[in-house]
Amino acid sequence: MEWLWFLGGLIGGTLWSVFLINRKIEQKVETLEFMNRVRRELEEILASCNETTDRNVSILEHRVSGLRKLVDRADKRIQVLQDLLRRSEDLAPRAVPESGEAGEPADRTTPPETERSSGEVGAPGTTRSPDTPEEPVVQGDIPSPREPNPVREIQGQKGLSPLSETVLSLYRNGHPPERIARELGLTVGEVDLIISLEKTVFLKDR
C-alpha cells in the first residue's frame, strides 16, 4: 500500500514538474515571439524611414536642378540686358542732332570749301562778304548730313554678345522668334526685345 502511495506521489510530482517546465517553455516562446514581433516592427519602421529619406533626397535634387536652370536662365537674361545696355550707350553718342537744336552744332560732313561756296554756313570765326558773288551750287555736291550710318557700324562692333548676334542672324534668315527662343533656350519676350531694338535702331537711322 505504501508503494502505491509512493508511486502515486512520484507520478504526481513528475506531472507537476512537466507542467511547470511546459509553462516556462511557453513563456520563453511567447517572449521570443514578442521579440521577433518587435524586431519586425523596427525593421518596418527603418524601411519606412529609408524610403522617406530617399524620397526627400530625390525632391531636394529635383529642386536643386530647377534652381540651377533658373540661375542659368537668369544669367542669359542678364547677358542680354547688358548687351542691350551697351548698344544703347553706343547709340547715344552717335545720334546725329538736328541742325536747329540749340546748344550743340549739327554734325556736318560737308567740307568747309563746299559750305563757303554754297553760301549757307561759313567756317567758325569768319563772315562772308556781301560783295562776294555766290557761286552756283551743283545738285549732289553737298552730301547729306546723315550720310554716316551708325547702325551699320554698331552692328559690326565687338560690344555685341555672341548670343545677340546669333538671335539677329537667325531672325534675318527668316526664323520666327518662337523657334529662335526654343533653340537658344531664351524666352520669346527676350528674343522680341532684341529684334524690336534692332528694328527701332534701323528705323531711327532711316
Image (cartoon, rainbow, N blue to C red):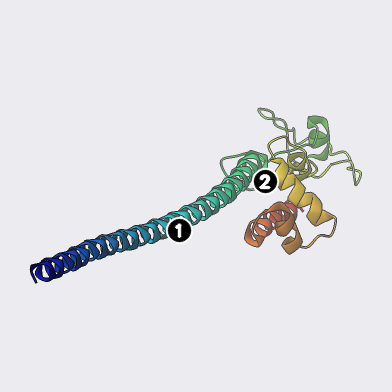
Decide if residue 132 is in sight here: no
Residue placed most toward the observer, 40 or 148: 40
Q: Nearer the viewer, mark 2 or mark 1?
A: 1
Residue at the farthest front position: 1
- Is 119 drawn above or below residue 21 in the view shown? above
- Is 134 drawn above or below residue 12 in the view shown? above
Residue placed most toward the observer, 164 or 128: 164
Inter-mark Cα distance, 2 to 1? 77 Å
SS type, badge 2: loop
The residue that appears at 22% across and 61% down in the rendered structure is 21
The location of residue 161, given as percent across then percent down, is: 69, 40
Q: Is residue 148 left or right of residue 189?
A: right
- Residue on which the image places disc 2: 99
Residue placed most toward the observer, 2 or 143: 2
Residue 1 got which mark? none
The location of residue 126, given as percent across then percent down, is: 69, 28
Residue placed most toward the observer, 193 or 91: 193
Q: How many marks?
A: 2
Residue type at mark 1: give it. Answer: Glu
Q: Is residue 196 left or right of residue 25?
A: right
The location of residue 164, given as percent across then percent down, is: 71, 47
Residue type at mark 2: give it. Answer: Ser
SS type, badge 1: helix
- Binning the other alpha carbons within 10 Å of mark 1 as few (below 14), some (14 to 19) or many (20 upward) gives few
- Is 52 drawn above or below residue 94 in the view shown? below
Q: Is residue 104 left or right of residue 173?
A: left
The residue that appears at 60% across and 39% down in the rendered structure is 104
Residue at the farthest left position: 2
- Residue on which the image places disc 1: 51
Tell me which numbered mark, 2 or 1, is placed earlier along the sequence: 1
Q: Using the rendered view, name the quadrant where residue 124 is placed.
A: top right
The location of residue 35, given as percent across then percent down, is: 30, 58
